[in-house]
Image (cartoon, helix red, strand yellow):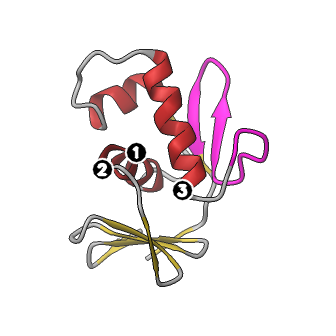
Amino acid sequence: MANDGVISFENFRIDLQRGELRQNERVVQVEPQVLDLITYLAKHPGAIVSRDDLIEHVWGGRIVSDSAISTRINAARAALGDDGQAQKLIKTLPRRGFRFEGAVRG
């Protein structure tokens, strides 16, 4: 999944050491927390990731509102060219969490 600090899926690459998200060779500008969110989901492809999992691993256990999580999910989808309707890469599972749908290569 992660090879030499790189996670690849679709036409995206996350360079873990540089802290960059790239689409093809173009750097996609995202906030660090949004990159952390995408990275966490991409490290768990096909698994249901609960809001509690995200709070623990992306927010470091700090208390955050549902709207803050939703805002970051929407920003992650926008960075990946996804949206709440298509949910091609980040699928919402009502009352359960989220699932990363991309085919991760490494």
**First in sequence: mark 2 or mark 1?**
2
User: Does residue 62 appear to the left or right of 85 in the view shown?
Assistant: left
Q: Which mark is residue 37?
A: 1
**Residue 54 picture location, percent across and down:** 38, 32
Q: Is residue 48 visible?
A: no
Packing grade of label 1 (10 A; few <14, some 14-19, many >=20) is many
Q: Which mark is residue 79?
A: 3
Rendered location of residue 80, percent (x, y): 58, 58
- Find numbered disc 3 in the image and state the secondary structure of the residue it sits on: helix
Tell me the amino acid under the disc marked 3: Ala
Regarding mark 1 in the picture, which secondary structure is present there? helix
Residue 85 badge: none
Q: Is residue 30 above or below residue 95?
A: below
Q: Is residue 45 placed above or below 73 in the rendered structure?
A: below
From the image, tell me which residue sits under label 2.
32
Comes first in the chain, label 3 or label 1: 1
Crowdedness near tag 3: few (<14), some (14–19) or many (≥20) residues, C-alpha within 10 Å: many
Q: Amino acid at mark 2?
A: Pro
Instruction: Give the residue displayed 43% in from the left and 24% down from the top.
Output: 68
> Extreme front residue here?
29
Cα distance in 3D space between marks 3 and 1 = 11 Å
Q: CA distance from mark 2 to mark 1?
A: 9 Å
Is 1 rendered above or below residue 71?
Answer: below
Looking at the image, is mark 2 or mark 3 earlier in the sequence?
2
Which portion, as a residue range, is magenta?
Answer: 83-99
**Which residue corresponds to the image point at 40% horizontal and 55% vertical from the top-left?**
30
The amino acid at mark 1 is Leu
Pick the front one: 72 or 42: 72
Q: Is residue 89 magenta?
A: yes
Q: In this rendering, is residue 15 above or below 56?
A: below
Q: Write the residue at 27% across / 79% down.
A: 4
